[in-house]
Amino acid sequence: MKILILGCGTSTGVPVIGCRCGVCTSGEPANKRTRSSALIQAGERNILIDTSTDLRIQALRNNVERVDAVLFTHPHADHIHGIDDLRIFNLRQRGPIPCYGNEYTVKRIKGFFEYIFVDDEGNGWKPRLDVTVVDSPFTLFGCDIKPVEICHGKARILGYRIDDVAYLTDCSGVPPESMELLRGVKLLIIDALRKRPHPSHFSIDQAIEVSRKVSAERTVLTHLSHNVDYVADGKGLPAGVELAYDGMEIEV
């Protein structure tokens, strides 16, 4: 299995529009971050996690030619507003794309993007999606998928464990029952917005603490803001912990 980090930035992306801070004006390529998303490559199948605002450019620069399924974590704009770009994959693959999320996320997506789900010939070319509510484990293309409920501020959203890989973006807390689902993962990709605490996201130290508790073999910190410099803040991290960057490929 290969994991491709399509984007590792927070909701604004990095650089932030109009910002002249050291990270936003940095010449370091790893400090250029599109909105958070990942691709799980299982054999010939591609499982996309979230349709980020930057899906089109992410697919182009990473030569993504198939999307066989989508796992949605939650319905915030930076994680779903690239949904219309799925229609080109429908065209290439000649069929609908199965999509999964919790009840709240599915309800919001159907409300925000009503045109996709209404049978109206006047709507023209639109994505063809088969959307399923999930709250228990299921199998997809030979992968064991476990929805993992996590806290994003006051909201309850989903992370996912796909075989021995766990992806937790936009996370500020992990309930005890979810912590058990994560134990022993080989790869943990987890939200770490910045060094300072935040009410809706883990800080770097908090993310590392979760990694320690679940005994992850390798941890990659994602959903990084412009308060995180890839070079300066990447130094001194514990063994087995590293910062994500756009285009990062990981074999598991």
Image: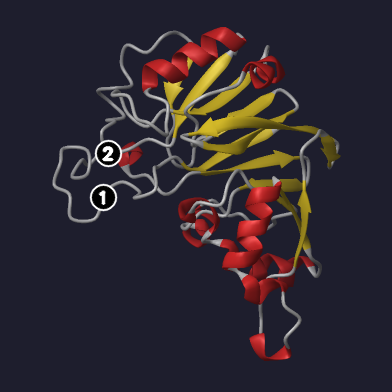
Residue 126 lies, with reference to residue 85, above or below; the image says below
- Tell me if label 1 and label 2 are in contact, CB under 8 Å: yes
Total residue callouts:
2
The image quarter in which residue 114 lies? bottom right
Q: Is residue 15 above or below residue 127?
A: above
The x, y position of residue 110, in whole percent, is 66, 64
Which is nearer the eye, 61 or 127?
127
Give the quarter of the figure containing the N terminus: top right
| Image vertical order of residue 174 relative to residue 158, above or below | above
Mark 1–mark 2 distance (CA, rounded to whole Å)? 7 Å
- Is residue 71 shown to the viewer in this render? no
Label 2 neighbourhood size at 10 Å, few (<14), some (14-19), many (20+)?
many
- Circle 2: residue type: His
Res 229 seen here: yes
> Secondary structure beneath disc 2?
loop
Residue denoted by label 1: 16
Name the spot of residue 221 as percent of width and height, x first.
45, 27
Identity of the residue drawn at 57% across and 54% down? 51
Q: Is residue 19 left or right of residue 168?
A: left
Could you classify mark 1 by the number of other residues whose Cα lies within 10 Å: few (under 14), some (14-19), or many (20 or more)? Answer: some
Q: Quadrant of the C terminus?
A: top right
The kind of secondary structure element at disc 1 is loop
The one of 66 and 10 positioned closer to us in this rendering: 10
Q: Position of residue 127 (x, y in %)?
A: 68, 70
Please report the residue visible at 20 percent of the width from the left and 40 percent of the height from the top. Answer: 26
Residue 221 numbered mark, or none: none
User: In the rendered structure, which disc, 1 or 2, sits on the residue that comes first in sequence?
Assistant: 1
Which residue position holds label 2?
226
In the shown orientation, is residue 117 left or right of residue 199?
Answer: right
Q: Residue at x 32, y 38 (%)?
A: 225
Quadrant position of residue 160: top right
